[in-house]
Amino acid sequence: MRAAFYDTPGPAKSVLRVLDVEHPEPGPGQVRVRVALSAINPGDMFIRMNSTPQDFQRVGEHTGRIPHQDGTGTIDAVGAGVDPSRVGERVWIWMAGAGHPWGTAAEWTVVPSEQAVALPDGISDELGACLGIPAMTAHWCLHADGSPRDRTVLVAAGAGAVGHYAIELGRIAGARIVTTVSGPEKAALAKAAGADLVVNYRDADAAQQILDGVGPVDRIIEVSLTDNLELDLAVTGPGATIVTYAAQPDDPTLPVFRLMWSNLVLRFALFLTEPRDALLRAAAEITAALREGALTPLPVHSFSLDDVAAAHEAVENGIIGKAVLDLR
């Protein structure tokens, strides 16, 4: 089969190539998926740039890894202990390539059965491929400190992938959602996702717009703590939680007394080390939301497998929406 592959860290065009590798076979508790779309996340860039020799494993006659965690496809084989009736099932995939080299940037991949989740009838591959890391990260950030029902939640970067699903899943969970964006195009996307209030964080009175519109916020889902901490502190109420799910090159300087004064909770969230029961709950609730028609896709930008390096560069350059490899 054909697969994207790299065996050394570095820039996309320097290290990514497409190889012929052997088909994977599902082991006990696993399913094999014929991949339709392989979705690309910023975390895939970090892994590619920071992999060490210990991260590379044997793939047939090669040693390295096939990138990407998310995607969609159809189960065509199952391992021991998996119900054979799953063969032929369309699925969305999360955390492929975690602990083994079989990411989704290939014609086939293998994952634990529970990480290939049945797509409800009528759900497109494009929507399914947008889920995975973005939607499950959003779910954890919303629920890690208890139900967000009747809470006011500020979602930073509401037009981003995690932000988009934080808005939609937050509304489903009964939260009031305010979000920040950087311009009109992104504001339209955030509003379409269902945000109650959309504010341009570049406005000099952004904090006052939030306070006038929804009052002090109870929970913040933050993508850039270094850049946004001052705004966050200006709009949080006592006992609020700031959940940050992304790391910037420069660590923030924390104003400890100001955090203490308001009894704030600062939480750090990473999808790959999220508790397993929380991941399974997220997958179940995301799928339930799909059945209700409550989730929408991001703008999808398709690339061929041979253009995998260009797809990575598009993500690195801040493409709005989701870059995917189309293997159909």
Image: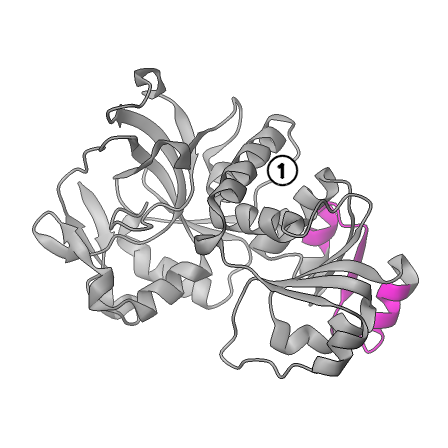
The furthest residue to the right: 212
Mark 1 Cα shell of 10 Å, populated few (<14), some (14-19), many (≥20): many
Identify the colour scheme used.
one colour
Q: What residue lies at 18% left-to-right and 55% top-to-bottom?
A: 57
| Magenta stretch, residue numbers | 188-211
Q: Which residue matches tag 1?
A: 295
Percent coordinates x, y for residue 289 in the rendering: 62, 32
Question: Viewed as shown, does residue 277 lie left or right of 149?
Answer: left
Question: Where, quadrant-wise, is the C terminus in this rendering?
Answer: top left
Q: Name the image quarter holding residue 267.
A: bottom right
Percent coordinates x, y for residue 49 in the rendering: 33, 70
Picture layout, residue 312 above or below residue 233? above
Picture layout, residue 226 above or below residue 54? below
Q: Is residue 58 visible?
A: yes
Q: Name the image quarter holding residue 178.
A: bottom right
Question: Viewed as shown, does residue 156 lie left or right of 72?
Answer: right
Check if residue 201 falls in the magenta segment.
yes
Q: What residue lies at 76% left-to-right and 67% top-to-bottom?
A: 200
Check if residue 300 falls in the magenta segment.
no
The furthest residue to the left: 61
Question: Viewed as shown, does residue 185 lie left or right of 271?
Answer: right
Looking at the picture, which amino acid does disc 1 mark?
Leu
